[in-house]
Amino acid sequence: MDALTLIATAAGLGWASGMRVYAVLFFLGVLHHAGIYELPANLHVLSHPAVMVVSGVLFGLEFFADKVPGVDTVWDAVHTFIRIPAGAVLAAAAVASADPGLAVAAGLLGGVIAAGTHLTKAGSRALINTSPEPVSNWAASLGEDAISVLGLYAALKYPLLFLVLLALFIGLAVWLVPRIWRGVKRLFAALRRLLGTAARNSLPPKVR
């Protein structure tokens, strides 16, 4: 791989893992198994039938869990401890055969980008879930499904295009993430006040 492809591959694996880690694992396995794309040697294991079955089942579970308001937020919270390390490991594995130092650098890059993608996704979905109708949640989830797969494919096949789009995403995320999480904090503060008021109103008058 040339330097541009190495950077795009590491960044793409981290970026997509922060959004849809099981889709990444399954998609990579399918691409390699079908002969559409030759994965780096350290990632050939993803095309093993057993790995593809497990990653496919997990991808299916995530696909449906992410469409249910509330469940998607819990799923995102749990996967904070999966998506970010997975993004780092996949990025490092993609370039490990080139140079150990590059592998460490790629792992750091993949982990940081995965964290940014995950925080953007989780925060925005938590805010979307405040809407009483489910359509916006479904639309956001389906959009993430498509974007994660198409973005990863672009990273593998069109590295320069992907890096340009990634730079735009990073700029948007830097501007958007603090605002999203301030909104999430205000939401939880309002919920605490609401629950506190309800708890006080449920007490007998002499106990209040």
Image (cartoon, grey):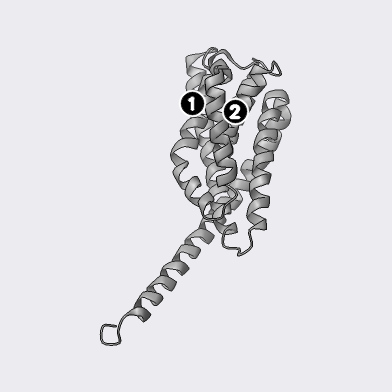
Q: Position of residue 41 (x, y in %)?
A: 56, 13
Is residue 25 something that shows in the picture? Answer: yes
User: What amino acid type is highlighted by mark number 2?
Assistant: Phe
Q: Residues within 10 Å of mark 1 (few under 14, many from 20)?
A: many
Judging by the rendered image, the residue that carries numbered circle 1 is 89
Give the alpha-carbon distance from disc 1 to disc 2, as whole Å. Answer: 16 Å
15 shown above or below 129 = above
Label annotation for residue 31: none
Is residue 14 something that shows in the picture? Answer: no
17 shown above or below 121 = above
Q: Position of residue 3 (x, y in %)?
A: 63, 19
Quadrant in which residue 133 is drawn: bottom right
The front one of 59 and 15 is 59
Quadrant in which residue 27 is drawn: top right
90 shown above or below 76 = above
The front one of 96 and 152 is 152
Q: Residues within 10 Å of mark 2 (few under 14, many from 20)?
A: many
Q: Say which residue appears at 69% left-offset and 15% top-offset.
A: 35
Q: Say which residue appears at 53% left-offset and 15% top-offset.
A: 42
| 138 sits left or right of 191 in the view | right
Closest to the camera, between mark 1 and mark 2, is 2
| Image quadrant where one finds the C terminus | bottom left
Judging by the rendered image, the residue that carries numbered circle 2 is 26
User: What amino acid type is highlighted by mark number 1?
Assistant: Val
In contact (CB < 8 Å): disc 1 and disc 2: no
The front one of 207 and 171 is 207
Query: In the rendered structure, which disc, 1 or 2, sits on the residue that comes first in sequence?
Result: 2
Q: Position of residue 38 (x, y in %)?
A: 66, 15
